[in-house]
Image (cartoon, grey):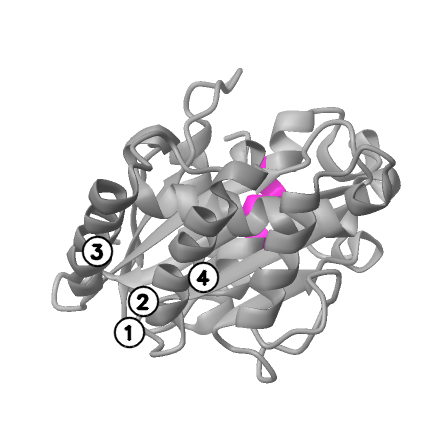
Amino acid sequence: MPEDDRLPLMHVYCDESSQTKNKYMVIGGIWIPEPNVKKIDDEILDFRNTSGMSNELKWGKVSKGKLNEYKQFVDIVFSYLVKRHLVYRCIVVNMWDYDINKFSNGDSELGFYKIYYQLLLQNYLNGYRYIVYPDDRQNSYKHRLEALKIILNRGIKKKYNVEANPIRAIEARKSHEVNLIQAVDLFTGAIGYKWNKMDFKPDASAAKIELAQYIAYKANLSTLMICHNKQQSPNFHIWYFDLSKSHKNKKSKING
């Protein structure tokens, strides 16, 4: 069924953190109505020009020498977040409880996109068409994103009783070219850092510890290592996904 072109457009920018070697994986996203995208892009561009932060902004590059600039970047994003001009949502999964054969028929890539599916399905808001922009990554199945779009549209129509396909496209983007994917990387990286207790390591970065605390403060949370009700913090939501419950649900054939 075709999409409803009368509905306003919502952009969703996504990225993941701590996917391979750590206990907890986090996939996060920023949901932003299309008219707000240019406003925040312009402000970030002004910030880059005045601060000299011309390179990609990401959690892995946070350092003591650039800590204040990263805080300024966080402030810009939160200035839109507190006005609900955008929202940040993420899903946290315990990968030590993840059984690749049980949850995705031995296909780790399929399992990864099943988690993406849950993030996008559970955070669907009626009344919009969507374009989803995940960070670009190599997929073994070349039609993975198109398959995700098809299955996601089916899931949304069933769960929310909508008729038209709300997901217009899922298009990968290179993070260094998209400011809002960089913002997602920063928030998602900070959450993964806390959940995986990287701050307790002997060589933990003092700058990352401070920035993670700063992001929690801006989100009105005591810590980023928390899962909470979306109604308690609708603009910045951290959701722990219980795999034991999810396996009871119908399997999603995202592999096409």
Position in image of residue 234 (x %, y %) = 51, 77
Give the secondary structure at mark 2: loop
Q: Nearer the viewer, residue 27 or 123?
A: 27
The residue where tag 3 is placed is 43
Q: Residues within 10 Å of mark 1 (few under 14, many from 20)?
A: some
Q: Main secondary structure of the magenta part?
A: helix
Give amino acid for label 1.
Gly
Alpha carbons under labels 4 and 2: distance apart: 9 Å
**Mark closer to the chain start, 3 or 4:** 3
Q: Residues within 10 Å of mark 4 (few under 14, many from 20)?
A: many
Instruction: Note whether residue 27 is visible.
Output: no
Q: Nearer the viewer, mark 1 or mark 2?
A: 1
The residue where tag 2 is placed is 163
The residue where tag 1 is placed is 127
* Quadrant in which residue 232 is drawn: bottom right
Give amino acid for label 2.
Glu
**Mark closer to the chain start, 2 or 3:** 3
